[in-house]
Structures are given as C-alpha cells and as structure tokens.
Amino acid sequence: TLIPNHLPTADLQALDAAHHMHPFTDGDELNAKGARIITRADGVYLTDSEGAQILDGMAGLWCVNLGYGRTELADVAAEQMRQLPYYNTFFQTSHPPVIALAKRLAELAPGDLNHVFFAGSGSEANDTNIRMVRHYWAARGKPSKKTIIARKNGYHGSTLGGASLGGMSGMHAQGGLPIPDVTHIDQPNWYHEGGDTSPEEFGLERARQLEAEIARLGEDNVAAFIAEPVQGAGGVIVPPETYWPEIQRICDAHEILLIADEVITGFGRTGNWFGSQTWNIRPDIMTIAKGLSSGYVPIGGSIVSDHVAETINGAGDFNHGYTYSGHPVAAAVALENLRILDEEGIVTRCGAETAPYLREKWMQLADHPLVGEARISGMMAGIALTPDKAARASFAAEGGTVGLRCRERCFANNLVMRHVGDNMIIAPPLVISKSEIDTLIERAVKSLDETL
Ligand code: PLP
C-alpha cells in the first residue's frame, strides 16, 4: 500500500506539517504542535496513531450518521467501481445508481419535493440553488427577483456562493465576500440575543425581520430566503417554536422561495428524516449532503419541488453542473446508506428512543456551574458556557478562549466536542447506544470540571 500507516506519529506529523494545508486552521499554530493522526474508526469511536479510542461526538463533521465501519458501503462502492466507476449525466445519458437514488430521495422528502439536482458537496449544492432560484424567476418573467436573504451566523458552505449565503463574519472578512444581491437578517438566538423578551416573542420578532427586509428590498427584487432549520455551525441555535411558522407565512405571503439547508438536519439528525418535518416547514428547495452518504463518499444535491422543476425543465438548457453531479459510486453508496438507515430502523429509533435519552442526559448539563443553557434538537445539541448564569453572560473578556480550552480538555479526555465561541456542541452518529451516550456525558462533565 502507498498509505503510510506504519510510520511513527512524529514522522506523519512532520510530513503533514510540511505539505498539507488544513481547512479552517491556523497553519503555523497547528504545525508547531502537530495534528492528531486518526488511523481507523468503528461505530462511534475513532482510533489515533497512538492507539487511543476517541468518542466522536461530532460524527466527523456532522455527517457520519450511520457510524463508522459499515463494510456494506465499502462493498457497494467496490462493486459499482468495477461495473461503472464514472459517467456523467450532462449529454443525454443517465445510469441506474443515480436514477434509483433520485427516486428514493423523492420518496423520503416531504410534500412535492420530487426532483434532485446532484452536486459533490453541500457548498456546491447551495451554489446550484443560487443560480436555480434566479433562473426560475427569470424564466417566470420576473428577472428582477434576484436577491437572496440569508441569516447572520448561518453556514452554507465555503465556495464563493455558499460562504456569501453564510453569515460568518470571519469568512466575509477574507477573499472578497459576499457576492452581490445577498443580504442577511439576524438569527433567532434567544439565549445570547433575546434580552428581556420571552423566547416566543423573540422568535416572532426575528422572523418578522424577514418581512421588513423584503419590504426594504421590494418584493419584486427578492428571489428566496435560505436558512438551516436548526443553525448548526453557528452553535446549534435551536429556534423558538414561534419562529418557523412565521417564516413560512411570510415566504408564502410575498412569493419568496424557501430554501431549507438540510445539509446537517437531513437524514435523521433532528429525529425525523428531515428537519423540515420536525419544524413543519414546506421548502421549495432542500439542500442535502453529509448524512446522505454518512460521509463515506462526497455527494450533495438540491431536492426541488414540482413547480420549481417544471419551470427549470421548461426553460431550455440550465447551464450549470459539476463533473461529479450524480457520480455513480457516490450514488450507489448513498443508496445503500439510506437503505440501512431505513431498514435497520435507525432514524425511527433515533426519534423514539435515542434522541429522547440524549435529551434527558444532555439537559442535565445545565446544572453544571459553567453552563448557562443546554439546548437540543434531536441528535444535535449545544451548551453555552457562562461566568454568570443569571445574566446569561458570555466569556467575551477572555476572547472565546474558554470554549477553546474546554474543547482541548475534551480532546485530551478522548471526546470530540466542538466549540463555537463559548458554546460547546455535539452531533454524534445516530447509532450511538445509551451506554455510549453515558460515556459521552461523563467525559463532557470531566472536561467541563477541568475547564473551570
Ligand atoms: N450547509 C450547511 C448547513 C452545512 O453545515 C455545511 C457544512 O458544514 C454546508 C452547507 C457545506 O457543505 P460542504 O462542506 O459539503 O460543502
């Protein structure tokens, strides 16, 4: 094999530092200390090059819904590579894996979301969405409907389009973002921004910012609103119950397409197949990736409603697509992943048993002296660290280093928990058992104690 599994950790780290640039990383800082080298994984556990077993509380990057080590997916990939490793779907051709996957997604997705445009990732799928909604309105004789309203602190990917839709100020500060005709409204983050208002009032207030933004821009200039059903990378911001019904009402009233970015919330993460079902949303387009293949191979896409597909299909060539749109190996692996999630009852069990158990345990973290709030939606959860519970204060004075310290304590205690500022977040594989949830919570509490 060409894979240097046999090399000592220090040699792997040195080679990594010499030649590999890491995403979302301070390169010099990492290279000085060396990356932790992950060599294998099974179930919910990663193994590093020193043999430590790390509980992966983030399912990779919120994607390994099925857990690690499912050899059925490897077998399907190998078989598909032998039969048809690649062919495109640009020039009047199609193939069985992509046909079967599109049909399966149409069955799983709610309402009339019956058509799929494939991409290689969530970012690419959101780029597709930008072009598709603008093309849609142009084809319907309303070319001025171009602006897409998104949210501050949202995350929609790292391409120019995806990062522009996203509302991450640290990303906008680099590389000339955002692209034109994208605007951002505030997020429904009650704990940090709700002040004295009740969560219900605050949810309505933040939703009505969409109506105000549509009025400011003029309804004839707005193509779509995009949001994650539950903001993920922003810190697992669970919206108040009042938020989504009001957003849906506003989109309907003003002829604005609704794009639900389900890259994280799809495929069981919130306890149903899609977050749109959990939150009772009727999107015109849904962005998918991550859990679609449980991260075993890269694949993403847009699931599109009947009326959007009819308009796009009826408007001549849609001049858009990726070399790997509907890649046969990725499609075959995704199809097998969806089969297992369904036939082994993983999504159903998550909704009925695993997520309620995780909720019971996770919400108890709110009693910890360092924790101001615990929040959860299905199998994605967050806690806010605070120096003052009553004031819902953050550790702003420390410049976000308390969350970072907590993450480092977790990693030292063999738990992957991510930090977003002063928030700690998890999204474990959906197959996590009750005793593994207990281990996760024990390691989290120990790490919180050590952070104090
Ligand atoms: N949309 C959401 C909600 C995401 O969380 C992500 C990735 O974390 C993306 C889009 C981008 O997906 P990808 O990293 O596959 O391009």
Image (tube, helix red, strand yellow):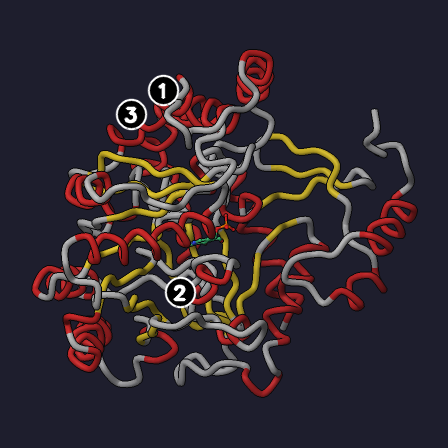
Q: Residues under labels 2 and 1: Cα distance?
A: 36 Å
Mark 2 near mark 3, Cβ–Cβ under 8 Å? Answer: no
Is residue 368 shown left or right of residue 14?
Answer: left
Q: Which residue is mark 3?
A: 103
Q: Residues within 10 Å of mark 1 (few under 14, many from 20)?
A: few
Mark 1 near ligand 1 (CB under 8 Å)? no
Is residue 261 shown left or right of residue 294?
Answer: left
Q: Position of residue 208 (x, y in %)?
A: 17, 75
Task: Please state which amino acid type lies under the numbered disc 3.
Answer: Lys
Task: Please state which amino acid type lies under the numbered disc 2.
Answer: Leu
Which of the 4 image quadrants contains residue 376?
bottom left
Q: Nearer the viewer, residue 448 or 14?
A: 14
Q: SS at mark 3?
A: helix
Select label 3 or label 1 by which is in front. 3
Tell me, yes or no, if residue 365 can be seen here. no
Mark 2 near ligand 1 (CB under 8 Å)? no
Q: Which circle's residue, 3 or 1, is located before the other in the chain? A: 3
Q: Residues under labels 2 and 3: Cα distance?
A: 29 Å
Q: Is residue 295 above or below residue 204?
A: above
In the picture, the disc for residue 343 is 1
Tell me, yes or no, if residue 232 can be seen here. yes
Q: SS at mark 2?
A: helix
Q: Which residue is mark 2?
A: 165
Q: Residue at x 60, y 13 (%)?
A: 82
Q: Residues within 10 Å of mark 3 (few under 14, many from 20)?
A: few
Q: Residues under labels 3 and 1: Cα distance?
A: 17 Å
Which of the 4 image quadrants contains residue 292?
top left
Task: Please state which amino acid type lies under the numbered disc 1.
Answer: Glu
Q: Is residue 248 above or below residue 337?
A: below
Q: Residue at x 62, y 58 (%)?
A: 446
